[in-house]
Amino acid sequence: MFRSLMIQGTGSGVGKSIIAMALCRLMSDRGIKVAPFKAQNMALNSFITFEGGEIGRAQALQAEAARTVPSVHMNPVLLKASGDMGSQVILQGRVHSHMKAKEYYLFREEGWAVAKESFDRLASEYELIILEGAGSPAEINLADVDIVNMRSAEYAKAPVLLVGDIDRGGVFASLYGTLKLVGRHGRRIKGFVINKFRGDRDILAPGLDMIAEKTGKPVVGVMPYIYDIGLPEEDGLSLKDLKRENLSRTAQLRIVIVRLRYISNFTDFDPLRYEPDVELIYSNNPDDIENADIVILPGTKNTVKDLLELRERGTEQSIIRAHQKGIEVVGICGGYQMLGRVIKDPFHAESDHDEVAGIGLLNTETLFERIKTTCQLKAELGDRGRINFIAEGHAESCRSLQGYEIHMGTTKGDIGLFLINRLNDQEDRTLPEGSQLRNCWGTYIHGIFDNDDFRRSFLNKIRVKKGLCPQNYSVDYNSIKDAAINRAAAIVRENLDMGYIDRLLKF
């Protein structure tokens, strides 16, 4: 018999995902077979499962914390905002359609049926399911169309912990108001968690007693403010205040990630944060771009719109000037498409334009089609890649790379930087992928920088170009990420009443 527990919040960004992730690790540590579940997620950072399905990055991280294989059933409905076109609706990992908000609300029962089917699948395979809500369950204007909060809790028969962010101010009003606005569903809420607390616990204590007295619900945890947990973020909101990372005096390489309006999968660059010789910057400032060592155009949910915006505000010319100065320019996924000569969109899959000129730093062209490519892959360096990337002492380890693809469109022309095998390809083919021309290269491979030796070889290439000695060490990114999960789990274990949780779950 499975058990379930749900983490809801008084709003977006209050810490639901991290707390759910930490609970997945804590339960896994106890030998419990646990899985995450979020009925509906809206996020531009996504992950590709082994079967080639697309889910929110947060659920993939939670599955990693639970020490289980990510599945499309852990996030059966994924919405990816596409600007004025509405959102791309992904059901159980596959693109269903594009819908505007009103269209999706009319579609909600179909989405709910898919969510229930996925939950039932997980319930038959796992002992415990940790559910996560989205936004707030108290959006009363959306109560009749909300499938991810109280409707999920009722279906799963899950006790709910309601998380509030004290750092925003008004946490007690948020907790009290949320409880009152959810009406009869309030019986599901079994306790409050106050997150991001910094200060004197003694001063907070009277408020904890008063909110319990007014609501009949205990505060079962007060989580401290964590300044940098060191884990991938779920969405672009985390980039709002991000300027520079790793400002240590040992940083000798400056990498600028071009900030795009529809940036997606910016978690591709998290491994670079941990390299001690790297300063990582998200910026559109011409001075930053034109004085970098590496400029990276990231993935985007709307390649054409972001390209045209770069062109309109002059950022494209900054990128071209940087390239002319010999600065390495890199494109990942949508950024790779932008760097080619032309982007064709005859079916208007992404825009109203039939054709748009690219930046023109690569001899490639991209054709947008109706089919979306989503797959995990293995790759090795092509002949040009071996010349371009392999550093001394890294030759063998750089030949075997892992990553995933998630893109509309196909790119043709001068390609073959990598040779890839798509793991869900029934034909078991080796395909050329990626392009390179002088000091510019691009690829569809998300997660390319997760490969430790490849990452270090590439950075060493730039070091040598600057007249610096190559570094022989290689940061183990997976170990760093796992240690960060354990740190988050330890914080939750120390500050949440785990005995109360066990009593809720009848463990």
Image (tube, grey):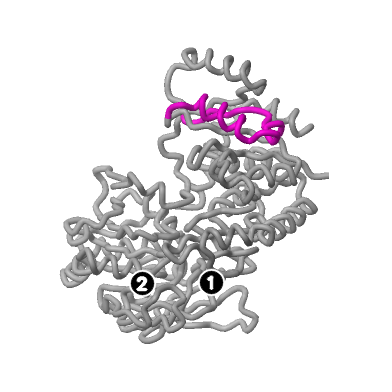
Q: Residues within 10 Å of mark 1 (few under 14, many from 20)?
A: some
Residue at the outermost right position: 1
Using the image, determine if residue 309 lies above or below residue 15: below
30 and 406: which is toward the camera: 406
The stretch of residues the image draws in magenta is: 169-196
Q: What is the number of callouts on the image?
A: 2
Do the residues bearing badges 2 and 1 touch, measured as CB atoms within 8 Å? Answer: no
Q: Which residue is mark 1?
A: 378
Work out whether mark 2 precedes mark 1 in sequence or the reverse, and give the earlier one. 2
Q: Position of residue 120 (x, y in %)?
A: 77, 54
Instruction: Identify the element where label 2 is drawn.
Output: helix
Q: Quadrant of residue 421?
A: bottom right
Q: Which mark is residue 495?
A: none
Q: Position of residue 242 (x, y in %)?
A: 33, 46
Kindly identify the amino acid type of the residue bearing the numbered disc 2: Val
Query: x, y (%) of residue 56?
Result: 55, 56
The residue that mark 2 highlights is: 304
Q: Amino acid at mark 1?
A: Lys
Q: Main secondary structure of the magenta part?
A: helix
Q: Nearer the viewer, mark 2 or mark 1?
A: 2
For mark 1, give the secondary structure. strand
Q: Is residue 373 above or below residue 63?
A: below
**Residue at 30% across, 53% down:** 282
